[in-house]
Image (cartoon, rainbow, N blue to C red):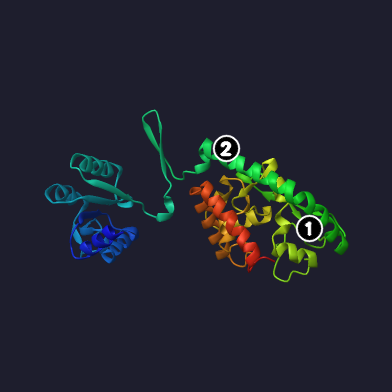
Amino acid sequence: MFYLYLLKHYRNKGGNFRNIVIVGENKSVLKIVSFLHDHTELGYRILGVFSDKKQNKKDSLGTIEDSFEYVISNEVDEIYCSMSELTNSQIKRFIDLADNNLKVLKIIPESKDDFTTKMDVEYFDYIPLLSLRRIPFDNPVNQIIKKLFDVIFSLVIIIFVLSWLTPLMYIFVKLESKGPLFFKQSRDGLSGNRFVCYKYRSMYVNEVADDVQATKEDVRVTKVGSFIRKTSIDELPQFFNVLVGDMSIVGPRPHMPSQTKKYAKTVDKFMVRHFIKPGITGLAQVRGYRGEVEKNEDMENRVKLDIFYIENWSFLLDIKIIGQTITNVFKGEQKAY
């Protein structure tokens, strides 16, 4: 830490810099230029920009063609190339230029939304293929770890909790309202396949339960239902869903088909959530994005967190989410209604 502290101050005073040139000009390039100018402690010095557009005359060093000679003739450490402004042949020339002159080459995509930080490269024979999204669950070892944890944890809850809780819930639910103990609803799961999701019934039997999401002070919710919803006890039967393989303990929450149909059209990358099994709890839920969707932004933030979980899964992350879920149950949550 002391070394990094000294290095930061040394760079701020003009030392230990890597010289870079940027080829191309678009919004992403301008943001990078602005970012590096504001963060001199990172150790980058921008020598200038090469572009055929010549919009930024202040930092312009010439055209794209001029950049090849400049890189060879000057002390350039790294080359940042904008993909949108270069042809395939020009990109190949820059790759050859970097390889043959010991320069680091970095490619700037046209939009940050086109790529993720978890891209992966695989080969068919000697032909490289760029996979835009590497999912940890594609690894068989990770699949086994998560599956074993799901089965063992769900068996423990079913044997030691649901075995005595279910008879009690039957009495409390039946005393207040007519209808079955379990509420069964169709949800969208892995690869968009539908399954029957189980919950303890928390509402009076009504005809719109499969289409209308619960809202604050919903008149359909019973007194017992209000308590078990606030404490998330109503979700516990989903451990049966986990045991049979429809769900996982941690993952994106499954939605009703009507919600999937709606948000798949209005929220970008909504369907990415279905690359893995849905969960009883998830990263989005412990971060506050659970329950009623009041505005599109709620669902957008939920999807972002779900995608982050999918791309960055680890066993430790699952344990953290489960721990936070238990903490939230005792603390209470704003949207637990």
Q: Of residues 211 and 138, which is closer to you in this image?
A: 138
For label 1, count other residues whose C-alpha is less than 10 Å away and answer few (under 14), some (14-19) or many (20+).
Answer: many
Where residue 151 appears, as percent x and y from the top left, is 65, 42
Q: Quadrant of residue 296?
A: bottom right
Left or right relative to 316: residue 61:
left
Q: Which mark is residue 234?
A: none
Q: Residue at x 59, y 52 (%)?
A: 252
On screen, 256 above or below 131? below
Q: Quadrant of the C terminus?
A: bottom right
What is the three-letter code of the residue carrying label 1?
A: Arg
Q: Of residues 130 and 141, which is closer to you in this image?
A: 141
Where residue 109 appears, as percent x and y from the top left, is 36, 51
Left or right relative to 51: residue 159:
right
On screen, 122 above or below 182? above
Q: Residue furthest left?
A: 73
Label 1 residue SS:
loop
Residue behind mark 2: 144
For label 2, count other residues whose C-alpha is less than 10 Å away and answer few (under 14), some (14-19) or many (20+).
Answer: few
What is the three-letter code of the residue carrying label 2?
A: Ile
Q: Which mark is residue 201?
A: 1
